[in-house]
Amino acid sequence: MTESQRAYEAKRAAKNGVSLDKWLQSKEQEKKAATEAKLPPAPAKPPGFFSRLMDRAHKPIKSKI
């Protein structure tokens, strides 16, 4: 962060009545929250081999009559 940016953020922090460190931490937290909100949910994982095998084992046997 350049000196001019740091001075600008210090003015904003003073205007809101907090220290510069707390101001920068709150900005980082807001930034993280915004990026996490934009991320799409992880896609559902397809069932594994043993899970499919167990599902098939619990189904009734079809008779070919």
Image (cartoon, rainbow, N blue to C red):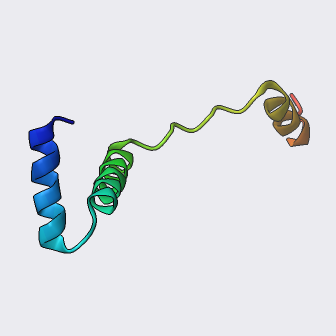
Which residue is located at x 33 percent, y 50 percent? 28
Horizontal relation, residue 44 to residue 9: left or right = right
Which residue is located at x 38 percent, y 42 percent? 39
Residue 53 visible, this angle:
yes
Horizontal relation, residue 14 to residue 33: left or right = left
Q: Could you tell me residue 60's position as x and y percent?
A: 88, 42
Task: Give the quadrant of residue 38.
Answer: top left
Residue 62 visible, this angle:
no
Closer to us: 19 or 16: 19
Q: Residue furthest top?
A: 49
Horizontal relation, residue 6 to residue 35: left or right = left
Image position of 19 with respect to 56: above or below: below
Which residue is located at x 20 percent, y 74 percent? 17
Q: Could you tell me residue 25's position as x and y percent?
A: 35, 55
Task: Give the quadrant of residue 57.
Answer: top right
Image position of 47 with respect to 26: above or below: above
Task: Give the quadrant of residue 14.
Answer: bottom left
Which residue is located at x 9 percent, y 41 percent? 4
Closer to us: 31 or 22: 22
Which part of the image, by quadrant, shows the N terminus? Answer: top left
Which part of the image, by quadrant, shows the C terminus? Answer: top right
Q: Could you tell me residue 50's position as x and y percent?
A: 85, 29
Closer to us: 15 or 38: 15
Q: Could you tell me residue 43's position as x and y percent?
A: 51, 36
Closer to us: 51 or 43: 43
Count of marks placed on residues: 0
Horizontal relation, residue 22 to residue 57: left or right = left
